Image (tube, rainbow, N blue to C red):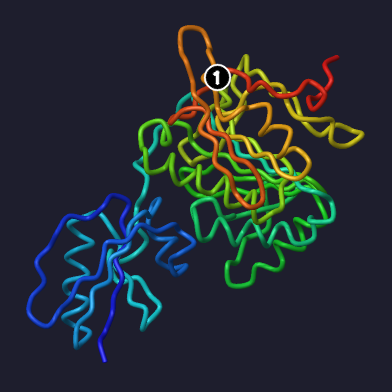
Amino acid sequence: MSYDVEVATHDRPGAIEAPDGVTIDGPFAVEPDDLAEPLAAAVLAPRWLTTVSAGNADSARKLGRRLAKLNEGTAYDPQEDAVFYPRGKPKRVPAAKPEKTSIVRLEWYLPAERWPAAPAELVATLARRCPETLPTRYGDFEPLRERYDPEQPDAFFDFARADSTFWFSSRPSFGGHAIPPHRLGIDLDWRVLETDARWREAVAGLFAAAAGALGAFYAECWVEPGWNVSRNNRLSIAAGRKTRAAAVGRDGWTGLPAEPAWLAWFGGEYRAPVAAALDGGAPMRKGLRWVTPEITVHDEGLCVRLGKQPRAKLPALPLPPELLTPRD
């Protein structure tokens, strides 16, 4: 009986010679949902999986560790259900300095009947796709008094189901919010996504995965300038910040926002008319730049991405006027 270890990487790993008695299977293209949760959570935007097998644990783990080290990957032992390389919590973002910057905000809108399960669904997706976005402290006003316990998350679920809830997270996330009974969101540091393609892919994957899990009828991800970031990863509003119009008013959902977004999700009754309006993703112009929408069809909805990098200025999608939020 062989002893197996798994190595996950973002980039396709290079060839490596296996010693006698050790075999390498792969690499195979994967998505985070194909991996064991400890492995998926430890790798930034995993795309490739390689299995190393040997007659004993030492030989398999030795080559698995070497393969992971050479390819900036992570090695996982299924027999122990644990990551063994790298040791400790991986540092996936560089140190940040306090300055005025932009945030990347993700928001999901879902039917009220989905709300009771929504906090747990979101946390499960965050834990697998981007654990930095999980709550550390939470509450309904600052200072946030409740401490999130990942071993006993029901207290957070109950709190978020009942009241407007805000939370702090670890870099590159600033935190998130849950506004019953329709809206969930998280905020991330634009500086990290601007410079690291792996983080862009991780966030894009998280956006679509959460939209599907939550049963969202609409979701959007956009860049919002005009924020100050402190040394302890806290946000404050900078002078002159322009706010984005809310899609949920006092009377509930008002329609699709007219403002463009880097990522947009259309589920439920919006899926078919939006797909027809986009006509397969014809190029659109914003100033001197042309942007071709990248359209991905999922079982639960349609995901549209405008460009590889998140930008504040993007062309608006040609959505049917009757679906949009009425202008004042």
Q: Quadrant of the N terminus?
A: bottom left
Classify 130 as above or below 250.
below
Q: Nearer the viewer, residue 247 or 272?
A: 272
Judging by the rendered image, the residue that carries numbered circle 1 is 314
- Residue 190 in the image: state x and y as whole percent: 47, 32
What kind of element bears circle 1? loop
Q: Residue at x 40, y 32 (%)?
A: 97
Residue reaching furthest to the bottom: 1
For disc 1, the neighbor class at 10 Å (few under 14, some 14 to 19, many from 20) is many
User: Which residue appears at 36% of the width and 37% of the height?
Assistant: 196
Residue at horizontal 41 percent and vertical 30 percent from the top? 194
The number of numbered badges drawn on the structure is 1
Give the image location of residue 112, x and y in percent. 84, 51
Judge left or right: residue 7 versus residue 315: left
Circle 1: residue type: Leu
Q: Quadrant of the C terminus?
A: top right
Q: Position of residue 65 (x, y in %)?
A: 21, 68
**From what the image shows, is residue 217 above or below residue 190?**
below
Q: Residue furthest right?
A: 251
Residue farthest along the top direction in this orientation = 288
Q: Which of the 4 image quarters holds residue 60?
A: bottom left
Horizontal side of 48 relative to 214 (left or right) equals left
* Quarter where residue 252 is shown: top right
Quick check: 266 above or below 79?
A: above
Foreground: 25 or 128? 25
Image coordinates for residue 122, horizontal then vertical, percent? 64, 56
